[in-house]
Image: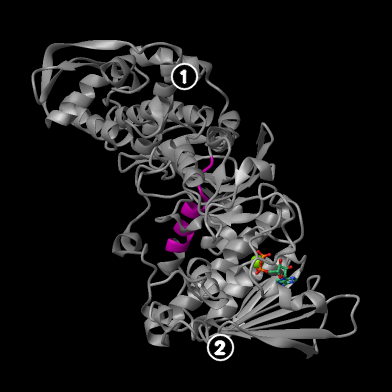
Amino acid sequence: MTIKHLNETIINQIAAGEVIERPASVIKELVENAIDAGADRIEIVTAGGGKTLLRVTDNGSGIPQAELSLAISRHCTSKLQDDVHDIRALGFRGEALPSIGSVARLSLKSRVKTADSGFEVGVEGGNLSPTRPAALNVGTIAEVRDLFFATPARLKFMKTDRAEATAITEVIKRIAIAFPHIRFSLAGTDRTTLELPATGTGSQAMLERISQILGKEFAENALEIDAERDGVRLSGFIGIPSFNRGNAQHQFAYVNGRPVRDKQIFGALRGAFMDVIARDRHPVAVLFLNLDPALVDVNVHPAKADVRFRDPGLVRGLIVGSIKQVLAASGIRASTNAATSMMEAFRAQGLQPSSHMPPQQASSYRPQFASRDWQTHQPRQEWSPATAHPAHRPLDLDESQSAFGSMPTGLNEAGQSVFADISIPTADARAGMAEPETEIMAMPLGAARAQVHANYIVAQTEDSLVIVDQHAAHERLVYEALKTALHSKPMAAQMLLIPEIVDLPEEDADRLTAHSETLARFGLGVESFGPGAVAVRETPAMLGEMNVPQLIRDLADEIAEHDTANGLQEMLDHVAATMACHGSVRSGRRLKQQEMDALLRQMEATPGSGTCNHGRPTYIELKLSDIERLFGRR
Ligand code: ADP
Ligand code: MG
């Protein structure tokens, strides 16, 4: 075959192969054009999942008559002057409209402010029609019909109308988050209408827009991020750790306003949440990076979803550092989700007969709590004024149970110094202080009243009831204490009488011995014991007695997973988390009054203690007002 120059339509269709994958990618290009044109109202209409019709109407600057036919020609753009490294608009390649025109029927109508009427051009499968007058308001209407009619092979790859319509909605939402001053509406025969009224500018407006898209619970569980380092600014919102999700759908990242799916950014986000969230859970976050366009390359791929930073380390450090700082500063705060779903669970059990119930059923209806016992039980005989006001007396304590002091926790003698570092009064210290009741009730987690089911501490504050999961809370405290201790000095080790030999797969044994120095910092003495085995001679004093083989195997897994990935610090955190899990007060342990109070005070003093190491809440708080509402008192 001889070498020939490809014709224009083929060139455009090849380009379309990269930019225009499905209806949602057309919408992305058209909406970005509307935003670049300075519109503050953008209306999108679709039919047949966008395969038969896509229409984007904007009130932006419009295109002058003389330039209309240029707009649909290849490599024609108004957005790029001479420097491809200085990109300030969303578009710049000048290939979206000609690409769309080469595979579909495109009509572009536009009117500028200074003209009394508008004009229209069309292109169908690459064939241009001459410019003619058209009636419209100032702005632009881009209409695409019969997508891929000119390239039927592409059409075969389309999913169902519904799947394509969903993808379009996702694209709009993703873009809309970054432009809260723009009103978006999305309508059409194949969807329910989505309306996103403009919320304005500034961070509050941003949070409102995010809540329009992610739901209003996000606003209640969001922490604001705003940090800057060496000319790179990071802003946005993250959900608190216990407000996590099962997939990464609710993570949004923008570089200079452009939605990106950049692995480095999402990887940094994961790193920042690593020790507050379970490995299979995902934080919710909306992050905006703004930096000098010269410091980031957005021209990595035609779809412009990938970026390359001049200094990736700086960006990662900024994301990880500022998120961790905000999480730490937020102190204890459990997701409102937990309390809300508890309230709903109560309601669902039907404390009031449903109005929809047939009368007969309604009359025999009993709240689930009102079981036989409830009906027949007399007030307890031993009731007396003294027990009626157990001002500070736990209800479910067995005095013979071991004291906190002898537990394998951060509170035994070896551990006390650790907690002293973060200046928390220990159980005994608190007992000596004998704070007045009112003062304790004024603390965020209040005064412990009882332990139920040997794992839940019930406490009372001035205006609420607090329920603490003692295992989750204690695990978190031990973890934080381990990390703190790690930064100050090597941890105290406890010699085992007889070294424990643990058999492992050979790679695991090698990995553990390779990291024996790191483990020694925690007070864990591990050495090689022939192929496929390690000998453990010392364990961290702080953790007390534990199941050594189990700990060793878990550690081997952690190291395997995080070894090469992100450096020593993250691995140390993982090792600390694994150890904390092994060294925590298990549920089932009865706690004394002072122990419970001490635990609450430690939680208050420990950053991040509102969630356990797996991102679950460590406590929930029910406001008295909500409880009263449950009982119909309000
Ligand atoms: P790019 O956006 O990369 O410049 P496009 O092919 O998407 O390339 O658009 C070509 C040009 O058409 C743009 O540079 C812009 O000048 C003009 N244009 C396209 N859509 C609009 C619009 N909605 N409003 C105003 N101008 C537009
Ligand atoms: Mg464009």
Q: Is residue 38 left or right of residue 263?
A: right
Vertical side of 493 occupied by 226: above or below: below
Say left or right for 41 vs 255.
right
Query: Which residue is at 40% across, 67% downward?
Result: 349
**What residue does disc 2 label?**
189
**Relative height, residue 190 to residue 566 (above, below):** below
User: Residue 199's mark?
Assistant: none
Q: In the rendered structure, which segment of residues is drawn in magenta?
A: 333-345
Can residue 571 be seen at all in this image of the molecule? yes
Q: In terms of depth relative to the viewer, which is nearer, 382 or 470? A: 470
Identify residue type, mark 1: Ala
Q: From this viewpoint, is residue 24 visible?
A: no
Circle 2: residue type: Thr
Instruction: Give percent across and percent down for residue 413.
Output: 35, 12
* Residue 85 coordinates in the image, percent (x, y): 66, 47
Looking at the image, residue 587 sits to the left or right of residue 351; the answer is left
The quadrant where ligand 2 appears is bottom right
